[in-house]
Amino acid sequence: MTVRQLTPHFVERFPEQLQPGVLYLAMEFVSAAHSCACGCGRKVITPFSPTDWQMVFDGETVSLRPSIGNWSFPCRSHYWIRSNRIEWAAAMSQVSIERGRERDVHAKALHAAAKKADDQAEQRPVDQQLPASGKAPASVAEAWGKFKAWLNL
Ligand SMILES: [Zn+2]
């Protein structure tokens, strides 16, 4: 039976059998699970991350972004979860599925690169940050030497 609405249940872990019509939210696992809204009974796990799904809980209802495309299931169902409601999306062609996957891979790569750059920037002292010209930063010993010279030590 097609599910029209999902009721959010905050749980510590996902049960073995998912009840249709329930959106299980396990914050410890940073993901949600539900039984496919088409009624096929397959388990749909939606991890939360900047490049996976984002969840909005307004205190009563839950929305997930982006849409859920169960391309790997025989049902190939595609829907949105908006304010607990299932909103069916148009079936996607294989081409747009592939494009979506490419975009996903690209987004993940960009995100990973940005994160790495952030990490490096955090580790690098201010005076050692890469200049716009892309010159390699001075070594710590070199910078320290300059600093000591500046202090007249
Ligand atoms: Zn299904």
Image (spheres, rainbow, N blue to C red):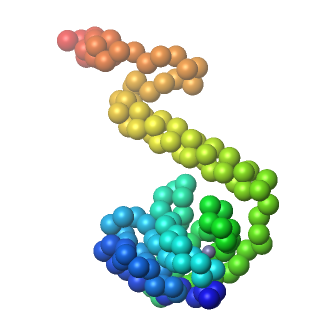
In the figure, residue 150 lies in which quadrant? top left
| Image x and y of residue 64, in percent | 56, 72
Regarding residue 58, the answer to whether it shows in the image is: no
- In the rendered structure, the answer to whether residue 76 lies left or right of residue 139 reads right
- In the rendered structure, the answer to whether residue 110 lies left or right of residue 149 reads right
Q: Nearer the viewer, residue 118 or 42?
A: 42
Regarding residue 40, the answer to whether it shows in the image is: yes
Q: Is residue 41 above or below residue 2?
A: above
Q: Residue at x 55, y 20 (%)?
A: 134
Q: Is residue 149 above or below residue 90?
A: above
| Image x and y of residue 152, in percent | 24, 12
Q: Nearer the viewer, residue 144 or 124?
A: 124
- In the rendered structure, the answer to whether residue 136 lies left or right of residue 123 reads right
Q: Quadrant of the C terminus?
A: top left
Q: Residue at x 37, y 80 (%)?
A: 10
Q: Quadrant of the N terminus?
A: bottom right
In the figure, residue 12 lies in which quadrant? bottom left
Q: Nearer the viewer, residue 139 or 52?
A: 52
Q: Nearer the viewer, residue 105 or 78?
A: 78
In the figure, residue 5 lies in which quadrant? bottom right
Q: Residue at x 41, y 33 (%)?
A: 120
| Image x and y of residue 76, in percent | 68, 68
Q: Residue at x 55, y 54 (%)?
A: 51
Instruction: Dividing the image into four quarters, tell me where ligand 1 lies.
Output: bottom right
| Image x and y of residue 29, in percent | 36, 64
- In the rendered structure, the answer to whether residue 38 lies left or right of residue 138 reads right
